[in-house]
Amino acid sequence: DAARRVRELITAHRHDETITVQPAPHSPHGASPAMIRAGWEVAEAEDTVFHIHVAEGQYEGERTLREHGARPIRYLDRPGVLGPRMIGVHCVWLDDEEIALMGARGAGLAYCPGSNMFLGDGITRIPEMLKAGVRIGLGTDGGCTNNRVSVFDEMRTCSLLQRVRLLDGTALSADTAFALGTRGAARLLRLEAGVVAAGQLADLVAIDLDHLSLQPRNDLLKSVVYAMSPQAVTDVWVHGRRVVEGG
């Protein structure tokens, strides 16, 4: 039934360029093996990405190991679900082998640092995952676990969390954090967006460069990531249509 409903939803919105439907069985601990495999099969048949929460809380890895004899990433690799089509959400509690396996299989990560902090889940090992070749984009998770739901806020949080985790003030740069929140996230979702260039979707925000939070203007990108107030955003376009104007 779930697979049928998702196929119907995909069909209903197939010609709406502002809507993307993806199968998303919740997690290894929250969906049966049959449900996870069914979701992946719909994604394969419809050529969409496949979205699943993975190892968000520390208990989840232990539970999957107890119930299925493998930690979450290895468990998802068994039925062939782990691969370029899969976006794992959170992936906080992965060991070195799981990180390497995600990279080897070409899987992606939707990283939601603000939500992980809000729930006290832990800190995903982003530099290690980038080094392993995991494709990463920033997300906010839902409003009930992230009151700000701001990608700009996630950029700052992502960078600072890695620095404090590794006790290294250079652990993750503003440039990397900005890329994860823009083109990295767009590519993860197969959207032609995330950069301002010909042929890309006109999904844009404009910011007031004279806003107090961006002064002094010594390094604009660093100021956007680390200092910018939401009030500096003046206009927003979605697929070329201005949906916010003048603040």
Image: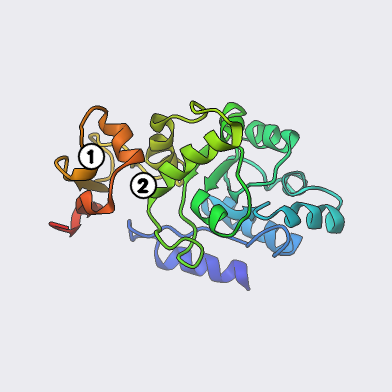
> Rounded to the nearest whole Å, what is the CA distance between mark 1 and mark 2?
13 Å
Q: Quadrant of the N terminus?
A: bottom right
Tell me which amino acid carries mark 1.
Answer: Leu
Quadrant of residue 221 in the image? top left
Judging depth in this view, the residue of 149 and 117 nearest the camera is 117
Position of 151 with respect to 74 (left or right) is left
Marks 1, 2: nearer the viewer: 1
Q: Position of residue 21 (x, y in %)?
A: 47, 60
N-terminal of the pair, mark 1 or mark 2, is: 2
Q: Quadrant of the C terminus?
A: bottom left
Residue occupying image coordinates x 55% and y 71%:
5
Q: Position of residue 112 (x, y in %)?
A: 51, 50
Tally the marks: 2
Q: Position of residue 124 (x, y in %)?
A: 60, 43
Tell me which amino acid carries mark 2.
Answer: Phe
The residue wearing badge 1 is 214
Position of 145 with respect to 177 (left or right) is right
The residue wearing badge 2 is 152
Judging depth in this view, the residue of 117 and 132 nearest the camera is 117
Residue density around tag 2, few if under 14, some if 14–19, many if 20 or more, within 10 Å = many
Q: Is residue 153 visible?
A: yes
Name the colouring of the figure. rainbow
Residue occupying image coordinates x 82% and y 48%:
70
Residue density around tag 1, few if under 14, some if 14–19, many if 20 or more, within 10 Å = many
Q: Is residue 112 visible?
A: no
Secondary structure of the residue carrying numbered label 2: helix
Judging depth in this view, the residue of 27 and 150 nearest the camera is 150
Secondary structure of the residue carrying numbered label 1: helix
